[in-house]
């Protein structure tokens, strides 16, 4: 892409944003890639290019091999817990200064948006730093602070101090329903938005992937930021090609010119 064309699109997107009253943001794994957190579907280094989700990210996989699944999440935690927000996260947090309470819907299970300073983050797929009872024996979710639980790591996950059954990461697995409060907040924000910024998602996993369509049907203008094509590209009114750590700061700078 010729950069003049891209620069013109950034100006156009900034102009739209400047006149917006109710923007909303939807992010996916791409926004954290420049922080060293792998995406899922990038062909070479995406997690699903290297691991089989059916063996690692379903309730059945966990019940069949709790230690394998737990250890894989410990590995992913080692990546997220040492990561820092990148320029894309920071630019999105800066956008909230211009639009107080800007709803930022994310499919990411890291907390890099919060670390960057975003305060109204809607987590559709949970939080990898948290754990809960597999059976949510005290209500959904029954969060467990595993730092207070003593267990033999060679034997797999810790057990719930209330019911003695397995503790699992507080993330949404394939085949599970999303946290109802977060999904409701995301749907309402999408319906009310006049602009949706869609950053770093392949748009392949519903219900998150249906939010841009919901926003667009309700009249929102869709701006996508992604170095590649996605399932959202065909409904995007403006597509900005490139990594969010580069494009988001350019968009923010254009807002002030
Ligand atoms: P994917 O891995 O499916 O898609 C990542 C997207 O980010 C792709 O479209 C890339 O082109 C784009 N991308 C790569 N580098 C980027 C960069 N530097 N800046 C911006 N974009 C970049 O990740 P998600 O769409 O988030 O669900 O995946 C959705 C869900 O599928 C995840 O939440 C996870 C997964 O299975 C669960 O675990 C429930």
Image (cartoon, rainbow, N blue to C red):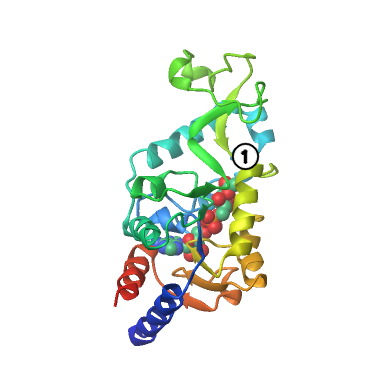
The image position of residue 101, as x and y in percent, is 46, 54
Would residue 122 be found to the left or right of residue 118 on screen?
Answer: right
Q: Residue at x 49, y 44 (%)?
A: 109
Would residue 143 be found to the left or right of residue 3 on screen?
Answer: right
- Position of residue 41 relative to residue 239, above or below, is above
Quarter the N terminus occupies: bottom left
- Position of residue 204 relative to residue 236, above or below, is above
Q: Residue at x 32, y 46 (%)?
A: 84
8 vs 243, nearest the viewer: 8
Disc 1 crowd, CA 10 A, few/some/many (<14, 14-19, 20+): some
The image position of residue 39, as x and y in percent, is 47, 54
199 vs 227, nearest the viewer: 199
Quarter holding residue 93 = bottom left
Q: Residue at x 60, y 50 (%)?
A: 185
The image position of residue 243, as x and y in percent, is 38, 66
- Position of residue 28 relative to residue 126, above or below, is below
Quarter holding residue 138 = top right
Q: Which residue is mark 1?
A: 55
Quarter the C terminus occupies: bottom left
Label 1 element class: helix
Q: Residue at x 54, y 72 (%)?
A: 222
């Amino acid at each position: 892409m010729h950069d003049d064309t891209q620069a013109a699109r950034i100006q156009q997107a900034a102009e739209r944003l400047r006149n917006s009253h109710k923007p909303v943001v939807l992010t996916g794994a791409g926004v954290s890639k420049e922080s060293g957190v792998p995406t899922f579907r990038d062909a070479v280094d995406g997690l699903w290019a290297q691991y089989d989700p059916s063996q690692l990210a379903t309730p059945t996989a966990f019940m069949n091999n709790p230690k394998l699944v737990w250890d894989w999440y410990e590995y992913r935690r080692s990546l997220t817990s040492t990561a820092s927000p990148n320029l894309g996260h920071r630019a999105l947090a800066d956008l909230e200064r211009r639009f107080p309470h800007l709803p930022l819907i994310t499919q990411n299970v890291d907390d890099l948006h919060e670390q960057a300073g975003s305060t109204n983050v809607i987590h559709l797929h949970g939080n990898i730093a948290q754990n809960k009872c597999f059976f949510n024996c005290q209500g959904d979710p029954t969060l467990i602070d595993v730092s207070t639980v003593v267990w033999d790591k060679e034997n797999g996950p810790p057990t719930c101090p209330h019911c003695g059954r397995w503790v699992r990461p507080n993330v949404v697995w394939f085949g599970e329903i999303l946290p109802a409060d977060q999904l409701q907040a995301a749907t309402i924000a999408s319906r009310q938005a006049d602009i949706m910024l869609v950053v770093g998602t392949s748009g392949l996993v519903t219900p998150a992937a249906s939010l841009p369509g919901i926003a667009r049907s309700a009249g929102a203008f869709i701006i996508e930021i992604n170095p590649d094509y996605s399932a959202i590209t065909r409904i995007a009114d403006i597509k900005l090609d490139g990594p969010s750590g580069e494009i988001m700061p350019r968009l923010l700078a254009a807002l002030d010119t």
